[in-house]
Amino acid sequence: MLRRILSEDYPRSKPLTALLLIIVVSLVLGPFLFDGIRAFTTLGMICVFIMVVAAYDLMLGYTHIVSFAHTMFFGIGAYGVAMAIESMGNSFGAILVGLVGALAISFVLSLLLGLLSLRVKAIFFALVTLAVAFAFLSLVTQLYHVTGGEDGMRVRVPRELGPAFRPFEAPLPGIDIPTLLKGLLTQPWNLGQVWQESQFDLRFNGRNVMYYVLVAMATGVFLFLLRLVNSPFGRVLQAIRENEFRAEALGYRTVVYRTAVVILAALVATLAGAGFALINRYVNPENTLNFELMVFILLMCVIGGMGTVYGAVVGSTLFILAQNYLQDLLKWVGQYTAGIPVVENLLGADHWLLWFGVLFVLSVYFFPAGVVGQLRIWSMRRRSRQSPPPSGPAAEPEPEPQT
Amino acid sequence: MTEETTAMPMSDTGAERQRRRPIEWLKDVRDNKAHLFLLGIMLLASVAVIDFRTWLVLTISGVAMGAMLFLMASGMTLTFGLMSVLNLAHGAFISLGAFAGGTVLAFWLDGFAGSPSFLLNLVAIVPALLFAAVVAGVVGLVFEKLVIMPVYGDHLKQILVTVGGSIILMQLIEVVWGPNEIPVTRPDSLSGAFFVPEFLPLIGGIVLEKYRLVAVVLGLAIYAAMLWVIDRTRIGILIRAGVESREMVEVQGYRIHLLFLGVFVAGSALAGLGGVMWGMYKELLTPHMGDEMMISVIVVIILGGLGSIRGCFYGALLVGLINLYIGFVEPRLAAVATVGLMVGVLMWRPQGLIPVIKV
Amino acid sequence: MADPILTLSGVKADIDQYHILHGVDLTVPKGELTVLLGRNGAGKSTTLRTIMGLTTLTGGTLTYQGQDISRWPTPKIARAGIAFVPESMGIFGLLTVRENLVLAAVNGPMDEARLQWIFDLFPPLKKFWDKSAGTLSGGQKQMLAIARAVIEPRDLLLVDEPTKGLAPAIINDLADAFEQLKAQQVSILLVEQNFNFSRRLGQTVAVMNDGAVVHAGTMAELAENDELQQDLLGLGLGAHQ
């Protein structure tokens, strides 16, 4: 059962399994485990970006295609839904029309981009997508009478997905994990009171419904991509990545495969964009199309681990947590560094991105496999140390001593 | 040989030659001098639809923008040509130069910059330009050693670390100068405009901003200087040789990495110079101004053919002009037209207008 | 045999994950022309590239004029007086003939007398002085490649298959050039498949097979000893006889 669901691609590392379990449980039980609007937004964003980053990883990690147009497709999805609702009213029909329209546009655009990538060298693809995405951003910003320009658009979601909709009469019980943990650490002798304090009432509303739609979407996309990369199709992608000429010589039309990957990634990004519009209920160029967002997606993908679908889950979770809470940490550190001229500024809460950038560059040098890849490498080393590999062709030969 | 080729058409009838020759000449220009062909088409098409006086002002402004773009793009195209290093942090060096130069103009030597005397203005402008170039160059040196050198030859990692490096540089700019926009007033003698007297035919009555003329002159001067270095000096020969084959340059006894470091530093300094000129043009500095220019810079170097300095110049001119012409007709479409130009040229000539052939 | 200018002992080298050289022992005598023979894939070109520092040494030592140059970077090796003409000739096609030679003269302006000597050896170079080198014919490119290697006085020339694909008349010109260089006491290590060309020029000879030197001796000995030639015939000499 589990074998089929995960397509026989297991985490292959105990710490990684534990980490993934924590993330999955937190996401699935999210609204019951974390109180407050900020936590809720964070959870929603994690779900959205798991989809976006997993699709991006299909290009970057599995095929070594660097695209800077991923946010463009994300934005097409978000704006598609927003504009459809704007003109047709807040119905599920409008959402469907918006989504299908956005998917169609993304399909055509990504097909064109893919075809263009056949004509130009791989490194050009990165630059061309960067330019095209920028042109799209500028177009959306300028055509303010349809897109709202810089101000963006409010998305009036159907009633069933909004805060006014209450499927349950009574509030549901919830346990706020951060409060609980904090209590356990600071006053473990006061268990009863800590327990009391961490309980909260969850008034389950339409936004929670939308959240669970997102969780389902993210799960579906994740399992689909996991299946895809472990299918024969995925193996061909990896063959192309390792040696394009050889793959071509074996008779695979590498160009077709690359274009297919670009299109698929674009469609998933569009879907995620639609989900984003519905959970965030507000789209503007900054939160859907910005170049900075594109860079963030790149960071999530690399930090999580390129070429592993699990990396998308870990990477987006870590990054979005850092984006939302690293500032708090820096503020807390800031209390102690206030008054030291340069340090104060460097550790300012506004500069969390600086430290993330440093972390990112260092991780490209020292842990190019990302969190998931590195955990797997460590586990493999430990395993091989515990049980020496059987002698034979599979065993790595010891390097000859150099003279 | 030459006699033969010119003699060939003589065998045709006179009338046929009359009809065919201009077209063949055009075809020849299109195929062998694609950059001039495109530039010619753009100038002709625009002069046909825009009133001549407006067109002249737009053209001069476009050339001015092209000159600044050339400064910003030349370093990036050379580092790619020489070491196939794609430095996506190049935009941060543009911002850096703008801020460094802006600091000189707005804070350190603002007294000189604000004075009406041209000579006193120069006391502020020259140090500002130099300081911008030096700061960007020095940071470029550190950046190359720390960030780029460990990932030579790996395009994917280069893209990743230079994107990361760009974030770091941009954040450091915010740490040093703060996150807010900084207004920079142009020195007195560079603001204002020339009025062409009314009585002159054709061009009478048009108004030309002084600063744009200065940008054109400075850009052309630097282009000429670079061409001189590239075409005539030993360093230039080395650079062109390195673009063709790094290995053979080393076999001749030159340390290619030292050469590359030099080019990278010079390229960063030029980006800084372009940045401060752009900053004076906009009269406003923001940490992301370099990033915003990166799109145009990328279009320029793709248009010209990655690694080609002449191509970079013509690419910059084309982008500058199309921005102004389309911007005049429909401002919203300027960016789209720029990218459209790039896509069109790529369909037509995937290697760019003046490609660099790797042997 | 004269004193060695270059000695390879147990030199090993890899390209990617493949072991190409498995311990090459080779001595290049000073002031003589040494021919390196062997069939395709025997490791001749890799040997030259390894001497030049273009392929990393994974074992053994390279001794040049009494110094261990095993770990030297390519530019340092070049400046120590070793010139290399690769099989592809490696000329800069976008540069003019003049610019190619300007670069090759690492220590400043070209010596007029030496340039005149090169023009006498290879007149086409004078004719196409300001033409871009990419437009030259194959033979003219080879002339330029060799001219570039000798525009400054060098102690050791490494030349990889200069006659490949060239017309007999041009091969004769090249042979003359090598004769003159020999007369100037320049040591030369020549990789060659053309046995007649090698026999005419070579004083010492080494034969490689499968990443190692399997025979070393004088050219006279090899040229007269038919049995030895027969023995080595399977190693790629037969085709050219």
Image: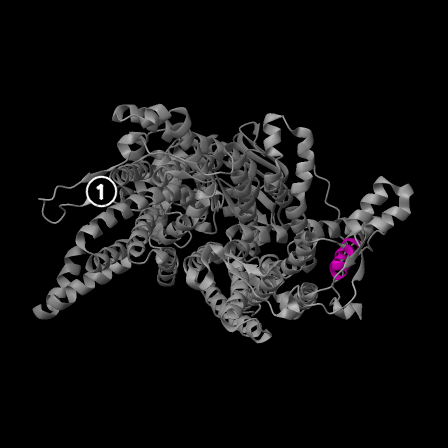
Q: Which of B14 and C59 is in front in this view?
A: B14
- Residue C228 among magenta residues: no
Q: Nearer the viewer, residue B320 or A280?
A: A280
* Residue A67 visible at all: yes
Q: Which of A34 and B99 is in front in this view?
A: A34
User: What type is the residue that disc 1 sits on?
Assistant: Leu
| x and y percentages locating residue A288 in the rendered image | 54, 57
Q: Mark 1 lies on which chain?
A: B
Bounds of the magenta segment: A17-33
Q: Is residue C102 above or below residue B314?
A: above
For disc 1, the neighbor class at 10 Å (few under 14, some 14 to 19, many from 20) is some
Q: Which residue is drawn at 43% across and 33% down?
A: C186
Residue at the farthest bottom position:
A93
User: What color scheme is it?
Assistant: one colour
**Which residue is under mark 1?**
B208
Q: Looking at the magenta stretch, what is its main secondary structure?
A: helix
Q: In this view, does A256 lie above or below B155?
A: below
Q: Nearer the viewer, residue A236 or A7?
A: A7
| x and y percentages locating residue A94 in the rendered image | 55, 73
In which quadrant of the rendered view does residue C50 lie? top right
| x and y percentages locating residue C30 in the rendered image | 49, 32
| x and y percentages locating residue B257 in the rendered image | 49, 36
A209 sits left or right of A174 in the view: left
In which quadrant of the rendered view does residue A331 lie? top right
Q: Is mark 1 on a helix, strand or loop?
A: strand
